[in-house]
Amino acid sequence: MKPSLAPGLEFTFRYTVPAHRTVPHVYPESDLFRPMPAVFATAYLVGLFEWACLEALRAHLDPGEATVGTDIRVSHTAATPPGLTVSVHVRVERVEGRRIAFRVSAHDGVDPIGEGTHERFVIDPGRFTAKVRAKAAAAGHPAPEGPVPIDAPVRVEAAGTPPKIIEEFVGRVRTGSDPVSIARMRSPAGWREPAQTPDFDEYTLVLRGSLRVETAAGALDVGAGQAVHARRGERVRYSTPGPEGAEYVAVCVPAFTPDRVHREDG
């Protein structure tokens, strides 16, 4: 947690309600939900309050940290039809150790539609996932065999200027995996990060644009459809000096963690 995460922090998040976030879609297998009015569902409003708080926290957590919801007490006081944009305002009321308390409210442009409180707790995702797996195994429900879908990545903090986007699909933050991490990167034109000497091998496949990889051997420009292997223990610097930036997939073995990257200052 960064020092900037403090009481008084405020954030506003906006979301346009689609048809598939209305009440009949909460449990479409239920014959009680299906005939209900097609308005923004309370269940999805609760999720939207959580989402807004997650966005508010994005820039104020340290790498490798995540949060889980532990308490929510909100009202839902007005119906919102699809197509309206809901504005959610959140404010940090208290920070007590790893517990963060929010005051939340929502307005759909016509009416205030809900308000209340929400609490989140900062966790180590790897430890949390291990505990959940142990609980499932103890209850006789170990992780299923066969392919396990990963529906969406988690966005993690990125180094360098201007900032790039990192979306982790597999790794310490998203899945609690330590042997390997897989992330999609999108870096803008002119992005450059500090040099690093990582304790992992990094394999990078460029999907779009061009990625420059600088080592003691010189600079290598890796274009779309090409890949590069940066070896463990080798000092390396990545950048995207080209006009279109780059989109690429990075695989780290073992998984990327802040304490393994050994990034230099500046």
Image (tube, helix red, strand yellow):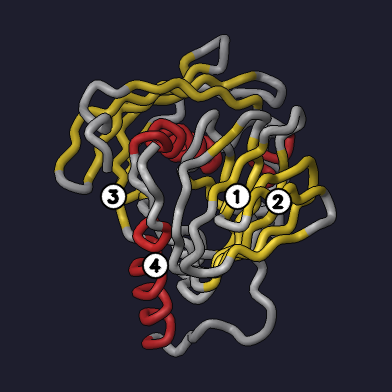
Q: Secondary structure at mark 4?
A: helix
Image point 56% across, 17% down: which residue?
A: 108
Is residue 42 at least partly visible in the picture?
no
Residue 151 is marked as: none
The type of residue carrying mark 4 is: Gly
First of labels 1, 2 by sequence position: 1
Q: Position of residue 155 (x, y in %)?
A: 53, 46
Give the mark toward the camera: 2 or 3: 2
Question: Marks 3/1: CA distance?
Answer: 39 Å
Q: Which residue is mark 1?
A: 214
Number of the front mark, 4 or 3: 4
Disc 4 versus disc 3: distance between alpha carbons?
A: 15 Å
Crowd rating for badge 1 (residues with CA inside 10 Å; few <14, some 14–19, many 20+): some
Answer yes or no: is residue 183 visible.
yes
Instruction: Give the foreground label among 3 and 1.
Output: 1
* Mark 4 or 1, nearer chain start: 4
* Mark 2: amino acid: Leu
Q: Are marks 2 and 3 in contact (CB under 8 Å)?
A: no
Quick one: 147 or 101, which is closer to the camera? 147
What quarter of the picture does the N terminus occupy?
A: top left
Circle nearer the N terminus (3, 1): 3
Please report contact status of discs 4 and 1: CB closer than 8 Å, yes or no: no
Residue to which mark 3 is pinned: 121
Q: What residue is pinned by disc 2?
A: 220
